[in-house]
Image (cartoon, coloured by chain):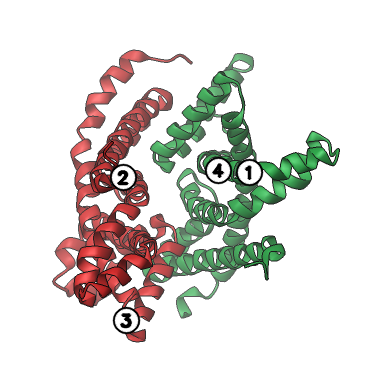
Amino acid sequence: MADLVGWWDDFFWGSVVVAQVFFASLTMMVLFGLLGAAAKLSNSRVAQKVAAAYTVVFRGTPEILVLLLIYFGSAIALTSLAQLYDPSIAFVDIPPFWAGSFAIGLIVGAYATETFRGAFLGVDPGQIEAARALGISGFKTFIYIQIPEMWRLALPAFGNHMLSLIKDTALISIIGLNETLFAAEQAIGTTGKPFTMYIVVGCIYLSFSTAITLTVMMLEKKANRHLEGAR
Amino acid sequence: MSFDFSLVIDSIPKMLMGLGLTLQLMALSAVLGTVLAVVLLLMRISRRWYLVWPSVTYIYIFRGTPILVQIFIIYYGLPQFEAVRDSIFWPILREPFGCAVLALSLNTGAYVSEILRGGILGVDKGLGEAAAALGLSVRQRFIHITTPIAIRLATPAYSNDIVSLMKSTALASTITLLDMMGIARTIVAETFAPYEVFLSLAVIYMVMTFFIQKAFGRFERHMSRYLKREN
């Protein structure tokens, strides 16, 4: 504990960055997941093929590879674009925060695609027919009937996707994001206590995972409250 | 910026030199991890608190923290203690390979244990009761009735986890190992051509994922052959 004096604030700000990455990538994950599920459930053969390729590619390649490809790939593309205007520019990159959030949002979005697809298919068609019979518009049916119904079915798997997201944030330190692992490396450089510092990082992630698990349990209870007493 | 195919042709054989290391990491961790998972599972379902409690805690910790942090704790962290450096395990823990296998096995063990438990919980209770009625002992029921069915039920999830494990082996490149990912990162550092190198490597990983899924699909069909009805 004595070794940690003076480093708490670094770890705290690192955790704040982890939380920020989490929410940024969560938004993208939901977006990509819904788009992917919509494409898979659509009647367009092309959209189905594209979505199938998306899930196969991002579920079959290591996360670190996708992350490095997106970060360095975009940096090269941006640099060569910038050099068209000003040849003296040496290096332009997307900030690691956004490259990283985008990469893990994209990866976990591939898993979320399958979850959302399955959940939409799990919604009883009778519910949609009933809504139509009541004269509710297609859009309103989607928002007020299909989304809440599918949300209940998707929640358990969705919780696991959120856990994957939070754990994947650790990878972004590889492209130089100032998060908890990065703080630990700096602390190790000064104190020479790698075990202590990395255990602190482990504890931070364990707290995040616990918070997510508890939140999902609460959400599940809320989503299933209309079923209580029906069993 | 252009896509240089000659670089693809050059780098693929170089990266495939790391295939052996990737496969070694994967096979060793899969075997050790599965053995650990079975032990954890037996502890978890034993109904003795002094066995259940450690197993639950272990699974909670290893599933709640990033594998990258676990690798760093083992490789960079453990040598902080003199006791570790003097112990008989030092020849393994000194080498990045030993540390990577240890971290991947410990991690896989936690995940697979939960998968196997899911398989056991999925076995129809009636089968156990039928076996009990036929006079099979608890042990006989577990070995001859529960286990084969649980294995079949757990196979799809297990195959996904082996794919995850294969993807996690790429993280060994962060502790200086030259697996396929490590070699790719070296080539990119020399040529600064992330597209050519990383995309080729992504294809290699996808092919491996494909073969893992094929192999497990075949195994699952073999295990479910009793379910096929003869017409």
Q: Residue at x 56, y 38 (%)?
A: A99
Q: Where is residue A142 in the image (x, y as percent from the top left)?
A: 75, 40
Q: Which amino acid does label 1 sit on?
A: Val
**Residue B166 marker:** 2
Q: What element carries label 3?
A: helix
- Residue A41 image-quadrant placement: top right
**Are the two marked residues, 4 and 1, in contact with CB atoms closer than 8 angstroms?**
no
Residue shown at the point (27%, 25%) measured from the top left: B12
Task: Check disc 1 and report the residue beneath it.
Answer: A30
Nearer to us of marks 4 and 2 is 4
Please name the residue that numbered disc 4 is placed on: A118
Q: Which residue is found at the position 26% from the left and 74% from the top?
A: B132
Q: Marks 1 and 3: same chain?
A: no
| Label 2 Cα neighbours within 10 Å, binned few <14 / some 14-19 / many ≥20 | many
In this view, the residue in front, B83 or A29, is: A29
| Residue A156 rendering spot, x and y as whole percentages | 55, 57
- Disc 3 marks which residue? B51
Q: How crowded is mark 4: few (under 14 residues within 10 Å), some or many (20 or more)?
A: some
Looking at the rendered image, the disc whose residue lies closer to the viewer, 2 or 3, is 3
The residue marked by circle 4 belongs to what chain?
Answer: A
